[in-house]
Amino acid sequence: MSDITRASFDHYMMPNYAPVEVIPVRGKGSRLFDQAGREYIDLAGGIAVNALGHAHPKLVEALTEQGQKLWHVSNILANEPALALAKQLTEATFADRVFFSNSGGEANEAALKLARRYARNRYSEDKDEIIAFDNAFHGRTLFTVTVGGQADYKSGFGPLPGSITHLPFNNVDVLRKAVSEKTCAVIVEPIQGEAGVLDAEPQFLQIIRTLCDEHNALMILDEVQTGVGRTGHLYAHEAYGVTPDILTTAKALGCGFPIAATLATAEVAEALAFGTHGSTFGGNPLACAVAAVALALINTPDVLNGVKERRQWIEKGLEKIAQNSGCAVKVRGQGLLIGWVLAPDWEGRAREIMKAAQAAGVFVLVAGPNVVRIAPSLVIPKEDVEEGLKRLEQAVMELAAESDTAATG
């Protein structure tokens, strides 16, 4: 496809994205290759999606095998891969029932609709308040973007859905005063990824659970980014000793093949009665076949413990780069969802670091202007970690040298 270039994006695509100049055409493990054949170390993981790297042979095998059998039958019929994956998910989690969709936003949309309908059916129409948190991100549908706590993402799309209250993240005192009998659900991320990789404090999640119980509200955990092994647990809430009523999962569930799921207890799930919600492609046999293999590969002691080991490798390397350059002050997050917080003198330069890293042959992410985000494959080899950090250090040191030169005139 020699006629396809970055300029093709500007010509044919809507301008809601601003992709970099590089166009990857092939991936293997934790390495990507662009149109010119240049190699990159992938420490971005498709924004925490490619949990088993690129073109994992067992996922390719699952997709190929299912692709020769059955692609799509619609929700008029059940299909074996979807039922098998639902069984896997319920056996591995708190949940009794599963609804499949295609993206994290859709999974959260379903969760929020389910919570509203459950409250209406069981209690009253007036029990409709959804409590969410400042700087949260829950998707791009009109409902989820309204529930999300980032004003820029909902600006210009009004009128917006109502009866949604935003509170400061990790503020227990404000939370206690806000939850009431009008509240139907509290939705929260165990780690706010888009907000700068901010961990929920254990007491915060535990009090959400307690307050929901006291006020007959549902606790919704958005584990779209933190789920499927990302933190070293199958789902991040396991480390907090908190069990939700509804949980959403996507991203790493399909390791790059679009799939998402909304998980719930049997009692809550009953509210989503026949005809109340749906998805044409949700539960697609291809997606479910891939996700079943991905889940089986990830949900093992070797992989989950390996996540914690790999975090140590990366954290140690980032600390070394920070000491040499002065660019960062700390590392946040859990497992392989890592936020590298920039120093005051480097504030606002996260995207600059991302671009410099790309030029040096390594992909990283940002989580706001002051945080570099790293979310690689959960099974990234040590040599790829070391090479990726070497390239990242090269990029940062070049930026530091340019800043020193500019400062001295």
Image (cartoon, rainbow, N blue to C red):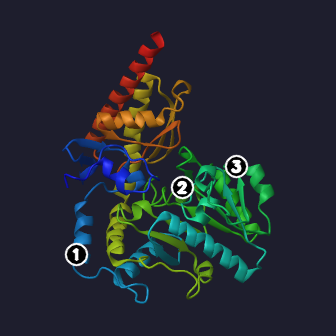
Task: Name the mark on residue 65.
Answer: 1
Q: Quadrant of residue 230?
A: bottom left
- The residue sitting at 48% across, 56% down in the picture is 225
Residue 378 relative to residue 217: left or right: left
Kind of residue at badge 3: Pro
Mark 1 → mark 3, Cα distance in angstroms: 48 Å
Near mark 2 (Cα within 10 A), the count class, few <14, some 14-19 or many ≥20, is few
Q: Which residue is mark 2?
A: 239
Q: What percent of the width, then of the height, locates residue 85?
A: 39, 75
367 with respect to 70 (left or right) = right
Q: CA distance from mark 2 to mark 1?
A: 36 Å
Amino acid at pointer 2: Ala
> What residue is shown with label 3?
168
Above-or-below relation of 196 to 326 = below
- Residue 388 location (% of width, % of height): 31, 38
Residue 73 appears anywhere in the view:
yes
Q: Identify the residue shown where x is 46% and y is 73%.
A: 101
First along the sequence among labels 1 and 3 = 1
Numbered tag placed on residue 5 in the rendering: none
